[in-house]
Image (cartoon, rainbow, N blue to C red):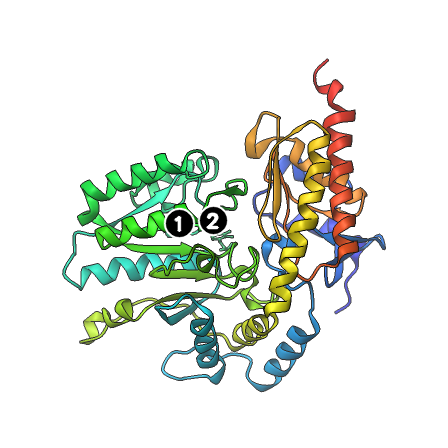
Amino acid sequence: MTHDPRGAIELDRAFVWHPYQPTDAWLGRTGIPVVVGAQGEWLELADGRRVVDGFSSWWTSILGHSHPRVVAALEAQLRRLDHFPIAGAVTAESAELAAALVGRAPAGLARAFFSDDGSTAVEVAVRAAFQFWQQNGAPGRTTFVSFADAYHGDTIGAVSVGGVELFHRMWGPLCFATLRAPAPAADEDAALDALGRLLASDADRVAAVVLEPLVQGAAGMRFHSPEFVRGVRELCDGADVFLIADEVFVGLGRLGSVFASSLAGVTPDFVCLAKGLGGGAFPFAATLTTERVFDGFRGGPERTFFYGHSFCGNPMGCAGALATLELLDDTLLERVGAIEAQLRVWLTAIEALGVARAPRARGALAAFDLDVPGGYLADAGPRIAAAALERGAFVRPLGSVVYLAPPLTIGDDALAVACDAVTDAVRAVCVDEAPRNHP
Ligand SMILES: *Cc1c(COP(=O)(O)O)cnc(C)c1O
């Protein structure tokens, strides 16, 4: 099939429904980019332009697009074995990947359960933690502790442990109840105190605490310290409550380490990986856990983990993941340090514009807040995205929070293009045009 990029927008308007997209704003929008190709950190648009992928295609293309080694692995895999679910059979791909993941994970993680995306990776952890206690002597442990502003995916289980008011408020009646600790970014000590009090009074009701270690991503790239993560681990240990680390965004090198928990020196009871795991090309996820949890499902058939997806252990996803882990070597992880240094220089240019608050960088991630009302729905976000696109970078601000999260393989020059594009876009939208908004 050959694609007609000119017809794509018409067909889209007629037939497609987009995620996280105000409908009328979309239908009324002009200048919508049509992406026709991608190589490395560059996106090719139908109008012939190349722009930098400043958000790693929604945090998935950590190795850039069509990395030659990922392509080779996927092509070979597609010819050899396209799919077999690991239901009643073994595949070498899934076995090798589980061993490779465990080999690089914090000591103590011992088993991998495969699924499809970030939401299912979290769902697996939540369901396994719940069932573990049901059949291992603590059936009263039926609830979870989540943090305010947390984002763990969009299925109902993942939303239940999420805490982004705007995204999640509507689904309240559909969700199971959780205990909520305050977001760590505002005041880590207060969040730890509150978690401590919750676990002191209610531990016998709690199956697990769910945390995005080091960065709450979708909440607006809110950082907290490794000490906070360690504090959460200690409180969980004290109450014998599981810790679920959702590394769907922060894992796989984004912060400079394959596992973000390693940066905090903790071993969670569950770690969720997805997004970039399938080589940036396949939806694919893994939930790692300990031998203790795995053992809790041994015994009679009534102790089975009654959970799984059609594409569980999909060999294409495994092949992408094995290539990804091989590529996430010391050289690439060191490169993340150089990206962070360049991003920090960029943030000083952003600060000089006088419209940004809380500039912050960690690994291949940098963000700042604009002083505008509206939060996630602030119209500065789409306006800056449009202005940045004209200047050579595709970005997708979280409303008033503007960030760059480029592929880890990005070159200095392309990163400079993205940084300059966003700086100029912020200047155009927030400095030059600002008087129009405040007459
Ligand atoms: C994106 C994300 C998810 C959900 O992943 P999907 O693949 O979109 O289902 C879960 N947790 C975190 C921290 C994420 O950033």
Where residue 254 sits in the image (x, y, percent)?
Answer: 57, 56
Q: Is residue 124 visible?
A: no
Residue 214 shows which numbered tag?
Answer: 2
Assign a secondary structure to mark 1: helix
Asked if residue 251 lies left or right of residue 148, the reply is: right
Q: Is residue 417 visible?
A: yes
Assign a secondary structure to mark 2: loop
Q: Image height check: is 3 above or below 317? A: above
Asked if residue 88 lies left or right of residue 378, the reply is: left
The CA span between labels 1 and 2 is 7 Å
Discs 1, 2 touching: Cβ within 8 Å = yes
What residue is at 77 percent from the left and 43 percent from the top? 421
Asked if residue 283 lies left or right of residue 294, the reply is: right
Front residue of 188/121: it is: 188
Label 1 belongs to which residue? 229
What residue is at 44 percent from the left and 75 percent from the top? 98
Where residue 402 sits in the image (x, y, percent)?
Answer: 64, 39
Front residue of 275/62: it is: 62
Q: Amino acid at mark 2?
A: Leu
Structural crowding at the residue carrying mark 2, measured as other residues with C-alpha within 10 Å and reported as few (<14), some (14–19) or many (≥20): many
